[in-house]
Amino acid sequence: MIINGKKFAQNLKNNIKREIKFLKIKKKIVPGLTVILIGNNTPSEIYVRNKEISAQEVGINSKVLRFKNSITEKKLISIIHNLNNDKKVHGILVQLPLPQHINGSKIVEEINPNKDVDGFHPINVGNLSSGKDSLVPCTPLGCYLMIKSIKKDLTGLNALIIGRSNLNGKPMAQLLLKENCTVTISHSKTRNLKELCKKADIVFAAVGKPNFVKGNWVKKGSIVIDVGINRINHKNGYKIVGDVDFKSVVKKAKAITPVPGGVGPVTIACLLSNTLKAFKNN
Ligand code: GUN
């Protein structure tokens, strides 16, 4: 089974849209999301545009604030403080990567954790890891929902996380641990990755290496989630591939996310879902 991320995302968005429509009629208020985009990094511009379009599609009041690369850290912090105090803004997202002169983790800590729709603030990270309710990073949240749609009870399953990033690997591990999986977090220094992978019922690949996970690494009947977005040369141009060698793994997996059209659209839908959650919490 190839998981259709676009369709899955559309379902999530339809539910969010319905709820926002209801809020608008009953309470005369809609959730607001502000995205801060700094500089002119092309992938970031594309991601932010897609976030904006999707937010508008479900009825979220979405704004993008664009700044030059030369913006100072101090100025950026004062903008975030203004958004923290703005009652019409329920979600704040600072698109990464940031210019070198700006300290990313310091910026994240300035965002009100209740408006931190990325789920990157240490308070949200701490709440997630202690099993409390929190805003959860959008990509792992989307992957979690897709896995749960395939198999409701994950108790006792072996889950292999490939990649230990704060954005993906670590929060995914927390979500699967909460579902009673036996979670292994692997990374660039891990030995015998292939052997670990062969034992996994769930594989979550987020390493940024094109076609890294091969068909002969994967157990038959496993669920394989591919978070990679890698640009590789192809014919006279380029193409986007994931961290999983789709051609060989699709023959072994029970369910697999394709790239593109898998995790990407679901991540955006989860940003909208987090914005609605932040709105309700406020
Ligand atoms: N850049 C790439 N992915 C992300 C994300 O999930 N959140 C933010 N803020 N920036 C990103």
Image (spheres, rainbow, N blue to C red):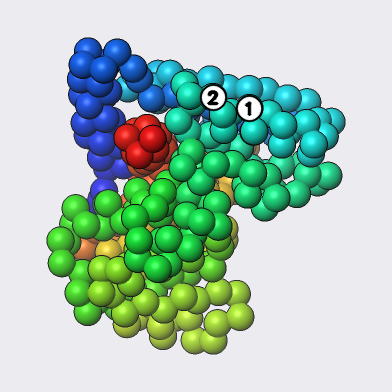
Asked if residue 143 is positioned above or below residue 75 in the image, the reply reads below
Q: Which residue is mark 1?
A: 82
- Spatial CA distance of label 2 from label 1 is 6 Å
Q: Label 1 crowding class (10 Å Cα cut-off): few <14, some 14-19, many 20+?
A: few
Q: Position of residue 204 (x, y in %)?
A: 40, 64
Q: Residue at x 48, y 81 (%)?
A: 193
Asked if residue 264 is positioned above or below residue 152 in the image, the reply reads above
Q: Position of residue 265 (x, y in %)?
A: 38, 38
Residue at the limit of the structure toward the left, as seen here: 152
Q: Which residue is mark 2?
A: 86
Asked if residue 111 is positioned above or below residue 32 in the image, the reply reads below
The kind of residue tagged 1 is Asn
Q: Position of residue 194 (x, y in %)?
A: 44, 80
Query: Helix, strand or loop at disc 2?
Result: loop
Q: Residue at x 40, y 68 (%)?
A: 130
User: Is residue 92 found left or right of 161 in the rendered image?
Assistant: right
Say whether residue 224 is visible. Answer: yes
Query: Helix, strand or loop at disc 1?
Result: helix
Q: Label 2 crowding class (10 Å Cα cut-off): few <14, some 14-19, many 20+?
A: few
| Residue 35 badge | none
Q: Where, quadrant-wise, is the C terminus in this rendering?
A: top left
Task: Please identify the quarter of the rendering in which residue 9 is found.
Answer: top left
User: Is residue 260 found left or right of 63 in the rendered image?
Assistant: left
The kind of residue tagged 2 is Asp
Q: Nearer the viewer, residue 249 or 63?
A: 63
Q: Residue at x 25, y 21 (%)?
A: 23
Say whether residue 243 is visible. Answer: no
Q: Residue at x 84, y 31 (%)?
A: 70
Ligand 1 within 8 Å of disc 1? The answer is: no
